[in-house]
Image (spheres, rainbow, N blue to C red):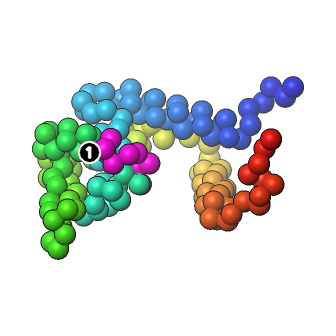
């Protein structure tokens, strides 16, 4: 049996270790991983409704509601009622969250720097291009229905 990890296992391990190292550094911020991930995605999608953010984060809406409750209690986010649909709440960052996001970005930069230590700029660029192409390929593949013989495995 081949002792080398498969691409999927290697990518999974790298992502896990990046999160672990980031979490270690970010403990001082007093946020859980789900809270800082929610803030990071919300900062890029302000004005989104809760259901849309739950889809992006790949969590159940009720799970996100609890995370948002905690962030709102800390004064980091706010919910605003949709102008035409009172059932929908739109999400926004509060000014108090912006310095925290900057600290998170700095921690991310340091963590990525550790991961990329010893890798040249050219190799980094090539790695980014390869991973980006892999993502495009997989997004397209996920939009393509599987043949029936691929869905039945026994």
The correct choice, above or below, for 52 with respect to 63 in the image is: below
Q: Is residue 31 left or right of residue 57?
A: left
The secondary structure type at the circle numbered 1 is: helix
Q: Is residue 57 magenta?
A: yes
Q: Nearer the viewer, residue 81 or 47?
A: 81
Q: Nearer the viewer, residue 18 or 78?
A: 78
Residue range of the region highlighted in magenta in the rendering:
56-63
Residue 63 visible to an observer of this rendering:
yes
**Residue depicted at x 60% and y 50%:** 124
**Residue depicted at x 41% and y 33%:** 22
Rendered location of residue 11, percent (x, y): 63, 40
Query: Residue 154 appears in which quarter of the rendering?
Result: top right
Density class for disc 1 (Cα within 10 Å; few <14, some 14-19, many ≥20) is: some
Q: Nearer the viewer, residue 63 or 8?
A: 63
**Residue depicted at x 31% and y 32%:** 32
Rendered location of residue 58, percent (x, y): 44, 48
Q: Nearer the viewer, residue 120 or 72?
A: 72
Q: Which residue is mark 1?
A: 65
Rendered location of residue 72, percent (x, y): 16, 44
Query: Residue 65 appears in which quarter of the rendering?
Result: top left
Quadrant for the N terminus in the image: top right
Name the outermost residue toward the bottom: 84
The correct choice, above or below, for 151 with respect to 4 in the image is: below
The correct choice, above or below, for 28 with respect to 103 in the image is: above
Rendered location of residue 67, percent (x, y): 27, 40
Q: Is residue 137 left or right of residue 116?
A: right
Residue 100 visible to an observer of this rendering:
no
**Residue depicted at x 17% and y 74%:** 84
């Amino acid at each position: 049996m081949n002792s080398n990890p498969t691409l999927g296992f290697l990518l999974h391990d790298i992502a896990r270790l990046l999160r672990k190292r980031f979490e270690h550094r970010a403990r001082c911020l007093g946020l859980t991983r789900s809270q800082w991930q929610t803030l990071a995605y919300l900062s890029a999608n302000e004005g989104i409704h809760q259901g849309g953010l739950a889809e992006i984060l790949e969590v159940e809406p009720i799970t996100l509601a609890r995370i948002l409750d905690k962030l709102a209690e800390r004064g980091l986010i706010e919910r605003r009622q949709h102008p035409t649909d009172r059932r929908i709440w739109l999400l926004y960052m509060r000014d108090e969250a912006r310095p925290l996001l900057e600290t998170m970005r700095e921690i991310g930069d340091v963590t990525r720097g550790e991961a990329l230590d010893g890798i040249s700029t050219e190799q980094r660029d090539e790695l980014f291009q390869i991973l980006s192409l892999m993502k495009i390929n997989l997004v397209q593949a996920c939009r393509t229905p599987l043949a029936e013989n691929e869905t039945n495995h026994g």
